[in-house]
Image (tube, rainbow, N blue to C red):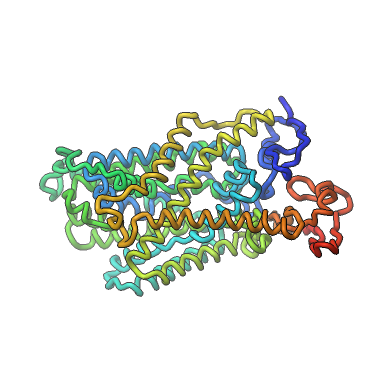
């Protein structure tokens, strides 16, 4: 069956491959999982968070994140950006193709690392082991600083007020948004099992809502409603097409945002029984289902609403549709309530997925108090990551003024994410090379190279075209200041993260005459995390002899540091709690 190559160079010294030799049988996938990326957070082969994610939860974790408020609100802004009905529909297809290509990237990574939740956190760490800590630190800073769900919470609050017949004021919206999101976080903290069950129920409601919109649209096209001419928008469907590159890029970003969520279940893959088969079968089901419903919903909008009204609808496209078909009254109120339920489900699954991402960042040992981030006490859920998610979201809901500042913060979330999406796709080629060097067998899923190249091309498109000025000039974006400010700030955050890496990992150790190493902390709830320690250079050889590549003790007597009088640097004794 094959075996690992016996490497003599340790990953601590910059090599990509570990010095291990193990059986390469079909049942030793976790061994390959560790060997391909010996550097990084320890693999929790038995999930301390339990196994509550079944095939239905996989579908609705993705569906509920994809179907938030986007399909009810973004068709108008997309049509306005591209200029024509025909191109607008084509962009929804392009968005699906890109989401499918990106999903194939996640599926292949999942077959390599089925015991690592957090998706991008783990996959970037495995793909880019060198320079050590660089990608984990950069991704962690971005994930922590931009880990908020303020926009959906505010939209949810707005629709709740509409459904309740209440006046919409700034602080009424903010207060309701904070209250609802607090409830979401408390549900996630209290019980993963019941949070997922609630998510599944809301997911069914979302699908039924979109199916109803789709069927209603077909009835409209058949001429059986009050709509006078349901085919007007489909005549000369490409008239008015906009050729401005920035507008087209903006439209593609919005379409991608509507599909964002196809990867959400991968954030909890270590909580899935038989993860590879389950993800391979049911993750594509969620994406294909949502694509069909998205396309039919857009057709329904274009059949019922004049093009000019859709372009000016902002976030009210679905409301215009129901008004055009059923008139004012209870139908619009009911739609507002359904959209509010959809937004609530989106907030819930996003919070669950984000908590796993933040937990994995903490388990890498690059955030303060890694044991606290990894802990699952007291409710068998990641308490501290949920708390951080709540705090950041509340700050962004309350602090920024409405308008430019809020739009800027929302846009800021997307650009660093596109950078990491490109790196993760390209990193798949690096992981394949490592596995080939190890003699690892072919896994159950492998993306076609042409699919990966397509995904890379779209990522480049999303990174480059936002820099092209919009039609109105450099101040013609969705904010009153320089249109690409969010791109500059996004890159600035990444640059600051890289600077933090060099100061912490390169400059300070050189000045203090020590090396940075990691040790594994085992907690009594089964959680494992890395902890960074400083090892004096005089003791480095003894350290490396006493620990494996993950930082676990390999000697019967654990290594204990001595105090170096010259540098006055020491590390705490290595202890374990099982």
Nearer-the-camera pick, 215 or 397? 397
Q: In which quadrant of the rendered image does the C terminus lie?
A: bottom right
Q: How many labels does the image show?
A: 0
Q: Is residue 191 above or below residue 423?
A: below
**Residue 385, picture quadrant:** bottom right
Q: Residue furthest right?
A: 557
Where residue 500 sits: x, y (%)?
Answer: 60, 58
244, above or below 364, in the image: above
User: Looking at this view, is 61 or 316 the one in front?
Assistant: 316
Q: In this view, does 293 lie above or below 355?
A: above
Image quarter of residue 405: bottom left
x and y percent of residue 434 in the render? Answer: 64, 34
Out of 338 and 460, give the one closest to the viewer: 460
| Image location (x, y in percent) of residue 80 | 24, 50
The N terminus is located in which quarter?
A: top right
Residue at the spot x=78%, y=50% of the render? 552
Residue at left 60%, top 51%? 136
Q: Give the image location of residue 497, x and y in percent.
A: 56, 56
Judging depth in this view, the residue of 237 and 346 nearest the camera is 237
Residue 57 visible in image? no
Mark yes or no: residue 411 visible.
Answer: yes
Q: Which residue lies furthest to the top in this view?
A: 1
116 lies left or right of 160 = right
Q: Residue placed at 33% from the left, 72% from the top?
A: 170
């Amino acid at each position: 069956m094959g075996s690992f190559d016996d490497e003599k160079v340790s990953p601590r010294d910059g090599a990509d491959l570990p010095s291990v030799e193990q059986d390469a049988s079909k049942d030793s996938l976790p061994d390959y999982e560790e060997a391909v990326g010996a550097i990084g957070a320890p693999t929790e082969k038995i999930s301390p968070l339990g196994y509550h994610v079944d095939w239905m939860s996989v579908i609705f974790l993705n569906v509920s994140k994809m179907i938030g408020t986007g399909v009810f609100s973004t068709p108008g802004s997309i049509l306005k950006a591209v200029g024509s009905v025909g191109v607008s529909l084509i962009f929804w297809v392009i968005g699906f193709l890109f989401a499918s290509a990106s999903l194939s990237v996640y599926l292949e990574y999942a077959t390599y690392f089925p015991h690592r939740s957090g998706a991008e956190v783990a996959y970037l760490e495995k793909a880019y082991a060198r320079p050590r800590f660089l990608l984990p630190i950069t991704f962690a800073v971005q994930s922590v600083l931009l880990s908020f769900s303020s926009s959906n919470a505010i939209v949810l609050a707005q629709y709740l007020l509409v459904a309740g017949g209440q006046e919409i004021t700034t602080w009424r919206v903010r207060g309701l948004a904070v209250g609802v999101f607090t409830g979401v976080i408390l549900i996630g903290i209290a019980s993963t099992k019941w949070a997922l069950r609630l998510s599944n129920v809301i997911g069914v409601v979302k699908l039924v809502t979109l199916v109803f919109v789709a069927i209603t649209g077909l009835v409209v096209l058949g001429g059986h409603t009050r709509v006078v001419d349901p085919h007007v928008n489909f005549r000369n469907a490409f008239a008015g097409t906009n050729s401005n590159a920035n507008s087209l890029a903006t439209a593609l970003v919005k379409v991608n945002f509507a599909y964002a969520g196809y990867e959400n279940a991968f954030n909890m893959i270590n909580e899935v029984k038989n993860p590879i088969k389950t993800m391979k079968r049911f993750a594509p089901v969620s994406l294909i289902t949502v694509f069909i419903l998205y396309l039919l919903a857009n057709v329904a909008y274009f059949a019922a609403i004049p093009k000019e009204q859709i372009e000016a609808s902002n976030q009210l496209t679905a409301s215009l549709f129901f008004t055009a078909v059923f008139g004012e009254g209870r139908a619009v109120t009911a739609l507002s309530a359904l959209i509010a339920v959809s937004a609530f489900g989106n907030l819930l699954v996003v919070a669950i997925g984000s908590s796993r991402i933040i937990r994995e960042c903490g388990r890498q040992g690059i955030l303060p108090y890694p044991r606290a981030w990894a802990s699952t006490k007291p409710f068998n859920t990641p308490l501290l990551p949920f708390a951080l998610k709540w705090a950041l979201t509340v700050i962004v809901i309350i602090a920024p003024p409405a308008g430019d500042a809020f739009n800027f913060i929302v846009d800021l979330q997307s650009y660093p994410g596109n950078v990491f999406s490109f790196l993760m796709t390209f990193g798949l080629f690096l992981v394949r090379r490592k596995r080939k060097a190890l003699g690892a067998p072919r896994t159950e899923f492998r993306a076609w190279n042409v699919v990966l190249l397509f995904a890379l091309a779209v990522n480049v498109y999303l990174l480059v075209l936002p820099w092209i000025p919009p039609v109105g000039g450099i101040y013609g974006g969705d904010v009153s200041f320089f249109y690409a400010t969010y791109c500059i700030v996004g890159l600035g955050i990444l640059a600051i993260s890289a600077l933090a890496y060099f100061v912490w990992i390169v400059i300070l150790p050189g000045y203090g005459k020590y090396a940075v190493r990691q040790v594994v902390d085992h907690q009594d709830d089964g959680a494992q995390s890395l902890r960074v320690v400083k090892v004096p250079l005089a003791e480095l050889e003894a350290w490396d002899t006493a620990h494996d590549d993950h930082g676990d003790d390999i000697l019967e007597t654990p290594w204990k540091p001595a105090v170096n009088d010259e540098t006055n640097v020491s590390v705490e004794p290595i202890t374990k709690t099982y």
